[in-house]
Structures are given as structure tokens and as C-alpha cells.
Image (cartoon, grey):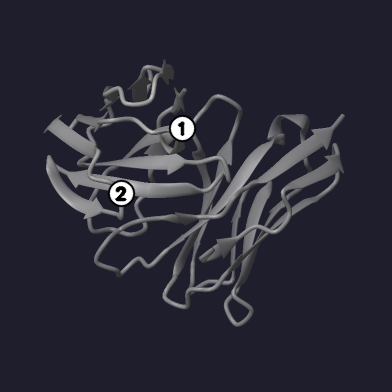
Amino acid sequence: DQQVKQNSPSLSVQEGRISILNCDYTNSMFDYFLWYKKYPAEGPTFLISISSIKDKNEDGRFTVFLNKSAKHLSLHIVPSQPGDSAVYFCAATNSGGSNYKLTFGKGTLLTVNP
Amino acid sequence: DTAVSQTPKYLVTQMGNDKSIKCEQNLGHDTMYWYKQDSKKFLKIMFSYNNKELIINETVPNRFSPKSPDKAHLNLHINSLELGDSAVYFCASSLLAGVGTDTQYFGPGTRLTVL
């Protein structure tokens, strides 16, 4: 039962262009969403998050958009840089729930070509 | 300074053996977690401890036993290892328990291979 889905296993973009990574969720109890970035042989590192009371959150080159009615979020990276090449995980949680666990998607491998 | 560290980084062992993975965090966090990333690449929560007390225990075989000697350490002991236990195990920590928006910081992972 995949409650968080990242349907694109990989994405390749040119340096300087926009990268758009997508994520869908099925659990309507989820109200807080996060993106983590993972380099090979390292653990995931937190990138950006968004609460369900917002539809957009921006941090430098990274912007996350949330469409609650569609149960869809996306991460935009602009401009993309070669150092952004990594696996990006979408995660979700019920912030008011009794157990504070994150549910992750399978990840999308982003490759930014120079 | 490594915030969340795990040892060993790689572990290769035979079926039926017992092994432990250690995790330490120097962030002063109260809550620690174990995640498993299997061959299908999903990262799934296994356990969570807050200040040495178990607060999350997902459906994990009894062969897996977490132990938290203090709030900076959370070790994972696995008995009678099976082929299906092969995975990457990630430790994580967060400052607070009961706060679903609290950022989790991950260790580098331990790749366990059971032969």
C-alpha cells in the first residue's frame, strides 16, 4: 500500500533549466510534507517542507507546491545545478497523529547535466 | 563533526547469525529512529525511541530488537538473520517527540548483506 508515490524513478535536465519532481499521496490525514535529498552512500538530508495550510513554500532555488484537492505536491529547482544531482524523496506525515512517523516515496533520481 | 553516525557502514554475514548495528547522535536530540530501505527502495520506519522509551514499533519481526542505553544512542540487534533482512538500515534523530513537523536527521546508513 503505497501511500506516497513518486512515479518517475528518474529525471534528467540540463544545467540552468528547471527541474520538477512530482509526488502524489493517498492518505487524506497527511498534513505535512517534506522533501529529502540523498547522495550515494549518505543518509537523506532535509531539503524543504510545507504544511497543508499553505500551497507554496520557497527556499532559495527550491520551491514546493501543494495541491491538496489533487493530493499532489511538486518540488521545483531553478536553476538546476550539477550538484543537485541526487535522489529526492518525498515524505508525508500526520503532524497531529499519535505516532510521529514519516511515510516516504521511492525516490526520484535527478541528474543535472553540465 | 558527524551529527548522526552509524557503525558499521557495511556488514556481510551468514544466515542464522546475530548482529548489531550501532547509532549515535551528538545533536542533543531526544528522539531516535531506525528505518529500513529494502530492495524496492522504500524507506520504512521500524522503531522510534524518545529519551530511551519506545514510542513507535512498526510491524517488525521479533528478531529485531532495538536498545537505547541513553538518549544519544540507539542500537539495533538482529537475531537469526534471514536473506530478506538484506537492506540498508538508517538511523535518524529529531529534537522533539510528539511534534510531527520536527526535522529528522539521518545517519549515513549501514548496508547489511545476508548470504
Q: Position of residue B10 (x, y in %)?
A: 45, 18
Residue B36 falls in image quadrant = top left
What amino acid is at disc 1? Ser
Residue A28 image point, x, y percent: 47, 78
Residue for point 56% across, 40% down: B39
Q: Label for residue B60?
A: 2
Which one is earlier in the sequence, the residue at label 2 or at label 1?
A: 2
Label 2 is placed on what type of residue? Val
Instruction: State the CA–CA distance, disc 2 to disc 1.
Output: 14 Å
Label 2 residue SS = loop
Q: Residue at x 29, y 68 (%)?
A: A97
A97 vs A75: above or below: below
B49 w.r.t. B115: above or below? below
Task: Tell whether A57 sits left or right of B83.
Answer: right
- Regarding residue B70, the answer to whether it shows in the image is no
Dot 1 alpha-carbon crowd within 10 angstroms: few under 14, some 14 to 19, many 20 or more:
many
**Residue corresponding to mark 1:** B86
Dot 1: chain letter: B
Q: Chain of mark 2?
A: B
Residue A113 location, quadrant:
top right
Residue count near mark 2 (Cα–Cα under 10 Å), binned few <14, some 14–19, many ≥20:
few
Disc 1 secondary structure class: loop
- On screen, residue B95 versus residue B8, left or right, reads left
Query: Residue at position x 37%, y 49% from top?
Result: B45
